[in-house]
Image (tube, rainbow, N blue to C red):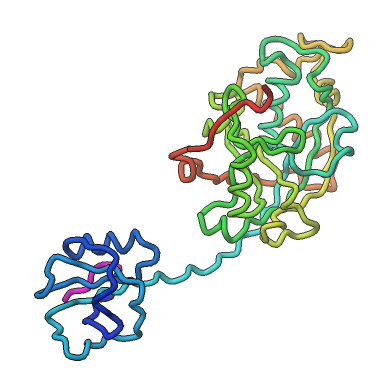
């Protein structure tokens, strides 16, 4: 008989016995589907003259070649053996080097090791500052600055994804929300988060890889248009941090080097006498917080200040593509969402 797609077509073999069967279906295509859906099924027997409409799913068909069952005509049964797909070659992930940024209060960076936190590219951090820190969610100046945040730290990141993640066609995982060192899962509007188990499930399968989300994807948050369309946020699991060159093993996916700090006052002093005033100083630096052009200007100014202040570092390192595909993993999102802060 003609070979079924995904199976080798065999004549009846002496590995087959008549007293073991796991189910029946009608026709080659139904048998193929039934066997494909059963991980233990190694093939199936399809009856011809004797049992034309019955197939037996088998887990004991493992001969190296076809044989005829002694005393039995080939016209009675055909045996189809499931083909085992070849094991894909392990693809070594490239080493990627780029800058991340994090805004903090003075002295906060020295309290804890870098990890279990969220960071961003410079566009993402500038938008965070102008949306939540120096304004009341873009509705007027905020003073004192929220959380006493007053400086931007830059880190030179080396990253290498695990083979398990590369096999899925990605270098980044989901961007988890970290709060006080705890992974709260993917957090959506209204602080509705999927919880620590969501993080643990992904990390167990793919290792402690860096996560990311692009603002333009509107997933998981921010989920509306922003004046920082090039913004990216990251998540940094401490368990994946190692020294030197990351290996791509599950517990060694990234390393970092501190690459400079710029105070908000340094940026604000470059554009004085505006309407955003705090602690006796007024600045024009945070003008037009809803305008993409003004946001891009702020990013360029900050890049120039870092470059001028720290000439020993490259002025610009290209951001790697944020390639996590949420639609691949969460088309059917079954994770329960809750507000961990209430």
Residues drawn in magenta: 1-6
Q: Is 3 inside the magenta-drawn segment?
A: yes
Q: Residue at x 65, y 50 (%)?
A: 209
Q: Residue at x 35, y 85 (%)?
A: 64
Dominant secondary structure of the residues highlighted in magenta in the image: loop
In the foreground, 268 or 257: 257
Q: Is residue 91 left or right of residue 340?
A: left
Q: Is 49 placed above or below 39 here?
A: below
Q: Is 342 inside the magenta-drawn segment?
A: no
In the foreground, 70 or 309: 70
Q: Residue at x 55, y 46 (%)?
A: 323
- Image location of residue 74, percent across then percent down: 15, 83
In the foreground, 182 or 20: 20
- Image location of residue 184, percent across then percent down: 66, 35
Q: Is 192 placed above or below 100 here?
A: above
Residue 101: quadrant of the picture: top right
Q: Is 204 placed above or below 103 here?
A: below
Q: Please indicate, yes or no, whether residue 116 appears anywhere in the rendered image.
A: yes
- Image location of residue 285, percent across then percent down: 75, 19
Q: Is residue 55 left or right of residue 168?
A: left
Q: Residue furthest front?
A: 19
Q: Residue furthest left?
A: 49
Q: Is residue 311 left or right of residue 321?
A: right
In the foreground, 317 or 180: 180
- Image location of residue 149, percent across then percent down: 82, 25
Quarter the C terminus occupies: top right
Q: Please indicate, yes or no, whether residue 216 appears anywhere in the rendered image.
A: no
Residue 32: quadrant of the picture: bottom left
Q: Is 67 placed above or below 272 here?
A: below
Quarter the N terminus occupies: bottom left
């Amino acid at each position: 008989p003609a070979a079924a797609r995904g199976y080798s077509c065999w004549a009846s073999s002496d590995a087959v016995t008549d007293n073991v069967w796991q189910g029946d279906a009608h026709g080659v295509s139904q048998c193929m589907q039934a066997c494909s859906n059963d991980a233990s099924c190694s093939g199936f027997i399809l009856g011809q003259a004797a049992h034309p409409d019955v197939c037996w799913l088998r887990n004991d068909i493992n001969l190296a070649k076809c044989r005829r069952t002694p005393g039995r005509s080939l016209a009675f049964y055909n045996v189809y053996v499931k083909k085992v797909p070849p094991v894909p070659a392990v693809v070594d992930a490239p080493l990627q080097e780029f800058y991340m940024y994090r805004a903090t209060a003075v002295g906060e960076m020295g309290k804890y090791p870098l990890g279990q936190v969220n960071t961003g590219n410079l566009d993402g951090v500038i938008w965070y500052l102008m949306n939540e820190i120096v304004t009341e969610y873009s509705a007027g100046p905020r003073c004192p600055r929220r959380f006493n945040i007053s400086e931007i730290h830059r880190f030179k990141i080396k990253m290498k994804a695990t083979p398990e993640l590369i096999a899925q066609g990605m270098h980044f995982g989901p961007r988890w929300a970290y709060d006080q060192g705890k992974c709260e899962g993917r957090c959506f509007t209204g602080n509705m988060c999927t919880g620590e188990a969501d993080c643990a499930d992904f990390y167990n399968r793919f290792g402690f890889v860096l996560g990311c989300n692009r603002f333009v994807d509107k997933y998981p948050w921010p989920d509306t248009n922003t004046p920082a369309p090039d913004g990216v946020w990251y998540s940094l699991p401490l368990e994946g941090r190692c020294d030197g060159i990351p290996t791509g093993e599950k517990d060694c996916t990234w390393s970092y080097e501190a690459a400079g700090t710029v105070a908000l006052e340094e940026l604000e002093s470059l554009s004085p006498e505006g309407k955003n005033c705090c602690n006796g100083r007024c600045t024009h630096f945070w003008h037009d917080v809803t305008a993409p052009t003004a946001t891009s200007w702020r990013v360029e100014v900050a890049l120039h200040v870092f470059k001028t202040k720290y000439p020993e570092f490259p002025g610009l390192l290209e951001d790697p593509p944020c390639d996590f595909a949420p639609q691949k993993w969460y088309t059917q999102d079954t994770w329960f969402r809750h507000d961990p802060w209430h």
